[in-house]
Image (cartoon, helix red, strand yellow):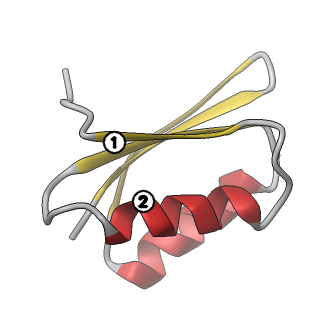
Amino acid sequence: MTEIHSRVDARQLDCPLPLLKAKQALNRMGSGEVLEVLATDAGSQRDFAVFARQSGNTLLQQSEQAGEFRYLLRKK
């Protein structure tokens, strides 16, 4: 099981706010730490995949259940 160091609840927020809140949280975290993000914006699926590729952070997990998206990102 992956240890989660910080969480962002971005449910009910529209694009680009889930990603913006995730970026802010990652900026406060140390290298190698894991961020969990919860979102309900379907567009966040694309946003987080692109963000991970461009930023060098690792998207460890992406899942969806009943319209709620969960992302785990490891800070580079």
Name the image quarter holding residue 4: top left
Q: Secondary structure at mark 2?
A: helix
Q: Residues within 10 Å of mark 1 (few under 14, many from 20)?
A: some
> Which residue lies most toward the top here?
66
Q: Is residue 65 above or below residue 36?
A: above
Q: Residues within 10 Å of mark 2 (few under 14, many from 20)?
A: some
Q: Is residue 31 above or below residue 67?
A: below
In the image: residue 69, left or right of residue 53: right
The residue to which callout 2 is attached is: 25
In primary-sequence order, the first of circles 1 and 2 is 1
Q: Quadrant of the N terminus?
A: top left
The image position of residue 65, as x and y in percent, is 69, 18
Residue at position x 26%, y 63% in the image? 75
Residue at position x 68%, y 52% in the image? 45
The residue to which callout 1 is attached is: 6
Q: Quadrant of the C terminus?
A: bottom left
Q: Is residue 41 above or below residue 69?
A: below
